[in-house]
Structures are given as C-alpha cells and as structure tokens.
Amino acid sequence: MVRPAGSITRGTTAHNRLRRADRWIAAVHGPMLRAASRPLVVDLGYGASHVTTLELFTRLRRVVPGVEVVGIEIDPERVALAKPYEREGLSFALGGFELPVARPPALVRAFNVLRQYGEAEAWHWWDVLRGGLAPGGALVEGTCSETGHRAVWVGLSPGGPRTITFSARFDAFERPSDLADRLPKTLIHRNVPGERIHAFLRDFDHAWAVTAPYGAHGLRQRWLASVSALSGSWPVFRHPPLGGVARWRLGEITLPWAAVH
Ligand SMILES: C[S@@+](CC[C@H](N)C(=O)[O-])C[C@H]1O[C@@H](n2cnc3c(N)ncnc32)[C@H](O)[C@@H]1O
C-alpha cells in the first residue's frame, strides 16, 4: 500500500462540533449532490472518534438519500475504532490527502485538519484535494472551536477557492473579529493592517458596534443589522443558497474568497 499523504495530528473532536458546516453543506451543495449519479462524500481527518462523520452522513442522507460517505483517517488506530460503526452508505478507510476512494468524490469536508500543517503545505494540499474532486465538486475546508460555536470555512471548486463563511453562535463571541482565531491557515498570517481580511474584520466589528441598539431585540437582530450594514461596502452574498436572511439568521455570513484574500 502507498504511504498515506500527510501526518498524524491531534485527534480532538466532539459530538455536534461540525453542525454549522454540515447545515451549510446540505443547503449549498445538496442540489449538486442530488444531481450526481452516485454521490460520494469524503470526510477527511475525522479524528479520535467517528462521531462527526456519522453526523455528516445522517444530515446528508436527509437531503440526498443516495449519498455515500467515507471517513478517511491517517491514523490506523482511529480507523480501527471507527470500523464497527460502518453501515450501508457509511465506511471508514485508512488514508491521507491522496484520498483512497473508488471514484472522485463530489464533496470533501476537511475540518480542523490543515490548521495543524504549515501555511505553504496548506496551499499545496488545497490544490491536491481540489484536483481530486469530481467535475463540479466541492472542497469545504475549515476550522472551528472545540465546541463548534465559532467556525470559519472556505468553499473550493476544482478551479480554486470560491467562498469564505464565518459562522458563530451569538453568545460565543463579543466582537465578530473574535472569529479570527478560526481563520484558515492560508489566511491567518494575513490578518494584519493593510490586508483585506483585516479590513473586513475591522469593518464587521464596526458594524457590530454601531448596531448595538438592536441588541435590545436579541443578538440575532443585531447580527442581521450588522450583516446588512456590512453588505453596503463588502460583497456579502445576499441571495440563497449562500446568503440572505435565512442564512444570516443562523449567525452566518458568506463572501467571495476574492474579497478577503
Ligand atoms: C483535530 S482532528 C479533527 C477531527 C474532526 N474533523 C473535527 O473537526 O472534529 C484532525 C484529524 O485529522 C487527521 N489527519 C491529519 N492529517 C491527515 C491527512 N493528511 N489525512 C487524513 N487524516 C489526517 C489527524 O490524524 C486527526 O485525527
């Protein structure tokens, strides 16, 4: 067997940690997965427990009944632990960035994996992973807090990065820029004055500050008002599936990648 590409890293994971990203994947990529003839989804680097892969499977099966999900881990012990949880449509395999699956996946979710690599490696593995996608497929690569209450992810097509999404529980931050600690590896070093990601987070904080009075009606209303204000000067997606009130009210905001990089 070819040695899996990558290295074993900490396996921290938790029940429901990736719920925010899963819900976005189902809404944004559900139609693409439903249209695929045998949709295959890979969860790369599922960690010390199979739980987030099982949750992805359960959530996707609701909207894409025929979807197949394969959890891939580079640590053989973690694969052995997950194997007993296999079922029709859900399996676990040993591997790395080379993605040892029978056909190109329509979607790859990789969460809290690349943050443990260097920045140059992260760019390289993005290229490798998107190069392995089925035509029209998607890579969703992100980072979140231990509980998943603060998350940032990038959506990539086979052609390159397309979107960035910030998602948070309303009581999990004081200012939107608190999400900076979850930026992807490819962006985290750019969060300095003069860079677009820094300007975006600064403007988001400003919008959050000036919409403080909306907090009287709850933090959700304040978030909606901030995102509306921000969309005057930033190309925030305003229409489904990537934007609009139905998404913003979840504590989410998506922009084109090009706006922040
Ligand atoms: C922090 S855990 C994340 C678990 C889960 N995805 C989550 O977000 O809760 C990262 C896992 O990725 C695995 N990993 C790291 N590099 C990998 C690679 N190239 N291929 C497959 N798994 C990898 C590590 O062994 C570790 O178990």
Image: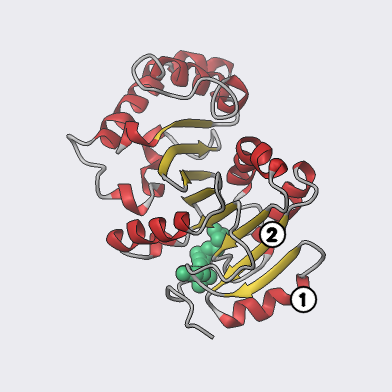
* Residue at 47 percent of width and 82 percent of height: 3
Q: Nearer the viewer, residue 204 or 154?
A: 154
In the structure shown, which secondary structural element does the residue marked by tag 2 occupy?
strand
- 33 sits left or right of 156 in the view: right
Q: Quadrant of the C terminus?
A: top left
Q: Quadrant of residue 35?
A: top right
Q: 222 or 238: which is nearer to us?
A: 238
Q: Identify whether 93 is placed above or below 205.
A: below
Q: CA distance from mark 2 to mark 1?
A: 15 Å
Quadrant for residue 177, please give it: top left
* Residue highlighted by disc 1: 84
In percent of width and height, residue 68 lies at 72, 58
**Residue at (51% x, 40% y) in the render:** 172
Image coordinates for residue 205, horizontal then vertical, percent: 35, 27
At label 1, the amino acid type is Pro
The residue wearing badge 2 is: 69
Nearer to us in this view, 131 or 183? 131
Residue 97 is situated, as x and y percent measured from the top left of the image, at: 47, 67
